[in-house]
Amino acid sequence: MHEHDVIVVGAGGAGLRAAIAANEAGADTAIVSKLHPVRSHTGAAEGGINAAIREGDSWEDHAYDTMKGSDYLGDAPAIETLCQDSPEETIQLENWGMAFSREEDGTVSQRPFGGLSFPRTTYAGAETGHQMLHTMYEQVVKRGIEVYDEWHVTDLAVTDEDDPKDRSCHGVAAYDVQTGKVEGFRARDSVILATGGLGQAFDHTTNAIANTGDGVAMAYRAGAPMEDMEFIQFHPTTLPSTGVLISEGVRGEGGILYNEEGERFMFEHGYANNDGELASRDVVSRAELTEVNEGRGIDDEYVHLDMRHLGEDRILDRLENILHLAEDFEGVDGLEEPMPVKPGQHYAMGGIETNENGQTCIDGLYAAGECACVSVHGSNRLGGNALPELIVFGKRAGRHAAGEDLGEPQITTGKEGEYEMGEVDSPVPLGEPEASESTEAATESEGSTAADGGAADGDAVLEETVEEQREMIEDLLESDGINHAEVRSTVQETMTDNVNVFREEDGLKQALRDIRAARDRYEDVAVSDPSRTFNTDLTKTLETRNLLDIAEAITVGALARNEFRGAHWRKEFQERRDEDWIKHTMLSWNDGEPELWFKPVLLEGESKTYEPKVRSY
């Protein structure tokens, strides 16, 4: 057993920043990650960090833009925290040596991004996330923070009181990819989940293969609610063949979108008469797919993104890696011809419910970054707001987990205060299937709790969790059955077909049927590779279990929310319904079944109340 004050699960931007902050607060801190830190998906972020650091800009304007972008589903305390803290945290990165792009006079460069009223996106070429990741990893190494890389966390050691608010987290069980051992990591104080995105629930995504929603699913099964899972961002500019991201920075620098007829459709077809290509991402993605669906797409699949007019010098200075991506994956020279692009799954606005200090409703369990929902993005994230979320809320979670007093949070967690129960018209039973004898050991531990309910001692809770995980993995290795890929592909295909940019009731119900069938098939899954070292068949089987919960949660939320808000478009409900739906969609794990409920959005900020208005660009 390994023991530390604070255990951070995940080593991307949020995890690294949380570990640094906890260490600075005096905690013995360790990072447990299934990837080496510099392989984390934060390194693929291209665009930049929104921060009001220039004269003429203000955090208040940034907060208004963010609330408007969220379509009034973001919580004001979280949004204002983000916008107030981002300048200081961005400058801290610069002081640590991050190589931001600069103007000729030496000032840090900022560019326009979609949905912003001021060009406040600070960047490092088109590889901002890569620079940020390496800058913070350097600080982790400098401070001597221990990193257990290539350890795949499979479960949380959480007590099993009936009410999740009475539960406490004492560590994690993890599988050592290099040796095949399952061991425990004891957290004397807290566990911080910073496991990133969930894009592998879809088959066309900008996300890395490792982004399987592990932290969200584990926290959900431990009793922490999921929040606003239906809101999935589809980035408007991904390469058709692979889903590789083409940065919003291209449009921020002046890139233009054209349809097959050579029309600049964002203006000419009235999708965004003021901001055009720099409307928010949900608006641009719907516009592109509408062009394709109405026969004005190229090869009935994509549109063109043209940056040739920017000139070679500007492109090489600010967007050079975009040239390499277009050439390597599509065979297109961006200096000589436009690039093919189409929408692809990119980001999850929802996640583990937390307050502005990163706390969940479970004592000692925190979350930060994309796996968390604080909620700063509401129903639609603005480009350039993901990276500041990592550093702002990663730092806050790290400090609070280490015992610092950050004041009383304004956002509540769990069923506290005002809430209402909900229901959804599902065509199939939801949640866990009846456990078969062959999978009893595997499903016994999926509540992420001590099985006997009486273990008050943290060591005992962790030991029991580790033993359960060992039994589950042995069962997967020794059984005969189907390969996880058959299950995963079913989920990915139905999510892309039915829970994409445009959503219809029949399609959402079909997705639930397909996910139900995939859950049933997962009961017969087994690992054919007997290896105990670097067994990717095993790790992907474990990840697929998480994807089942993630996909179901997204679809249940999408079916329940009978309105059109932000990234959530419903054919049957073509308007935003503020009188009924300015509320967060919550899902709790209730003995293996999702329990749907709602809680109000907090629109009252530090000095103003954000009144919902028509969102136009």
Image (cartoon, grey):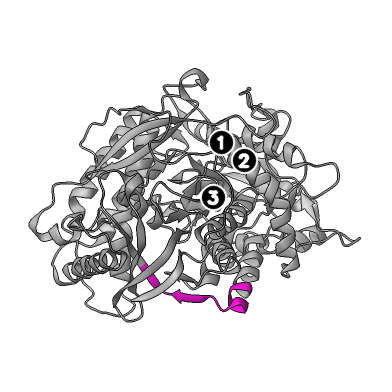
- Lower position in the chain sequence, tag 3 or tag 2: 2
Magenta-colored stretch includes residue 240: no
Magenta-colored stretch includes residue 149: yes
Nearer the observer, 528 or 612 = 612
| Label 1 close to label 3 by CB (< 8 Å) | no
**Residue at (21% x, 46% y) in the render:** 432
Residue 260 quadrant:
top right
| Label 1 close to label 2 by CB (< 8 Å) | yes
Q: Is residue 306 visible?
A: no
Q: Quadrant of the C terminus?
A: top right
The amino acid type of the residue labelled 3 equals: Asn
Q: Is residue 100 visible?
A: yes
Outermost residue, left side: 437
Magenta stretch?
A: 139-152
Question: What is the number of the mark on residue 357?
Answer: 3
Question: What is the number of the mark on residue 79?
Answer: 2
**x and y percentages locating residue 458 in the rendered image:** 31, 64
- Lower position in the chain sequence, tag 1 or tag 2: 1
Q: Is residue 407 left or right of residue 105?
A: left
**Residue at (26% x, 56% y) in the render:** 449
